[in-house]
Amino acid sequence: MTIPLELDARSYDIIIEPGLISHIGEKLSLFLKNPRVFVVSEDTVMGYHGGALKQALAESGIEAKFFVVPAGEATKSIGPLEALCNDILSAGIERTDIIVAFGGGVIGDLAGFAASIILRGVDFVQIPTTLLSQVDSSVGGKTGINTPHGKNLIGSFYQPKAVFIDPDTLDTLPRRELLAGYAEVVKYGVIDDPDFFTWLEKNGSTIVSAEGLPEKQKCRMQAIAHSCKAKARVVAEDEREGGKRALLNLGHTFGHALEAECGYGDTLLHGEAVAIGMIMALETSARMGLADHTDCERLTHHFKSVGMKTSVREIDISTDAETLLAHMHKDKKVEAGTIGFILGGIGTAAVHRGVDLEIVRGVLHDSLNTA
C-alpha cells in the first residue's frame, strides 16, 4: 500500500508492506546517487532486524555504514547528537549520500535532525520499526532532541524522501512498547474521527495482541494505514504546525510535562504519557463544558481494556500539580506566556488558549491523588 504525502517539491510516499525489509534495497536504490547508505539504529532493533536489512542491502549492491546508538529517550540529547554527527562525518558522508533511520521514534528524530544539519542537509529515509513511529513520528518531518528544559525543544522540520513501513517488525516489539504506540493510533480517532475510534473499540485488543490471531495482521495494517492517511492529510495542509497540525498534539501538553518530570527514562514511555495526557485533556474539557464526561469515561475504559496506564498514580513518580504546570509553561505551544491546550470530546478536538489553570490544577491533582 502506498500513501502519498503531498508537499509540492517535498512530497514523498509512505509505503506499507509486510516483509518490506527483505527487499528494501530495491526501494532504496531509487534514491541513491551512490550505492551506499549511512544507517542509524540501536542495539535491540539491529538484533532483531539488522541481519535482514544487511542482507537486503548487500543483495542490491549497496554498501552500508552502520551507526548504532543506545536505545531510549536519553539518546535524544545534545551529547549523543554531536557524537553521531562526528561519527557520520568521519565516515566520509557526502551531500549526495543518504541517511537511513532504522528504528523507533528516538532513532527517527535523532537521525532526521542529524540529516538536517550535517553538511547543511543530506537526504534521509525512515524505516520505522515500532508502532508509535510507524503511525506518527516517522511521518511529517518533525525531527529533534530533548533538553533539560523540555521535550523536542531543539529540532527542525525536515521531510524524509520516503517512509518504508514493515508491519512485521511489530511481532518482535515488547507489549509495553506496542501499547505505547497504540495510544497514538487512538489519538487520530479522538481528534476528529469518531467512527475510527468506534472501530478501535472493537479491534484494539486484536491490534495489540501477542497471540497469532488470523485477523491481527489485517487489523494492524488497517490501523497503520488509517493513521498515516490521517497524518498525511494534516501535514499536507499545515506542514509547520501553524494551524490544524497542532491538533496532533492532543494529550501531549500534559504528557510532555509528565515525561520531563520522569526524566525521559523508562519510568514512562512517550505513548504512555500521551495516553494519560489525552484522558486529562478530555477531563479538562468536560469540566470546562467542552465535552461530555462520558467521552472521558469511554476513552479511559478503552485504554484500560487493552492494558494501558490511565492515571499519574500508576507511575512511580513523586510530584505535584504545580511542578507539572511549570513544565507545561515550557512547552513549544506556549505563546505570549499562555499555554495552548488541545481540548474537546471524541471527534471534536480544537486548540484552546486562555484556559483557566485552576481547572487544569484540579485535573492534575485528581490524577495524582484520586484512588
Image (cartoon, helix red, strand yellow):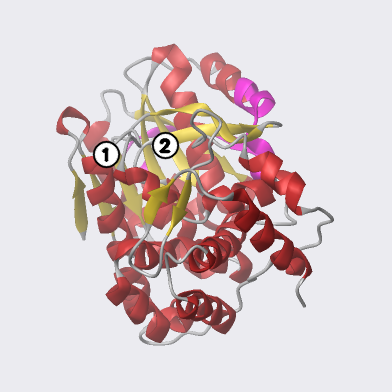
Task: Assess whether residue 212 is covered by the magenta stretch.
Answer: no
Q: Is residue 340 left or right of residue 80?
A: left
Secondary structure beneath dot 2 equals: strand
Q: Amino acid at mark 1?
A: Asp
Q: Nearer the viewer, residue 46 or 81?
A: 81
Screen quadrant of the C terminus: bottom right
Q: Where's residue 277, x and y in %?
A: 57, 59
Q: Nearer the viewer, residue 258 or 36?
A: 258
Give the left or right position of residue 353, taking residue 172 as reference: left
Q: Secondary structure at mark 1?
A: loop
Q: Which residue is the extreme one toward the left?
A: 8
**What residue occupies the far top of the structure in this picture?**
119
Q: Where does label 2 land, which residue?
A: 142
Q: Is residue 73 magenta?
A: yes
Relative height, residue 122 to residue 332 (above, below): above
In the rendered image, which quarter is residue 246 located in? Answer: top left
Please give left or right for residue 366 compared with residue 29 in the image: right
Amino acid bearing label 2: Lys
Q: Is residue 72 left or right of residue 261?
A: left
Query: What residue span does the magenta drawing correspond to?
Result: 57-83
Quadrant of the image containing the N terminus: bottom left
**Residue 70 visible in the current orientation:** no
In percent of the image, x 64 and y 35: which residue is there?
Answer: 150
From the image, tell me which residue sits under label 1.
Answer: 238
- Please state which of the two labelled residues, at mark 1 or mark 2, is closer to the viewer: 1
| Residue 262 vs residue 182, the one in the foreground | 262
How crowded pointer 2 is (Cα within 10 Å; few <14, some 14-19, many 20+) is rated as: many
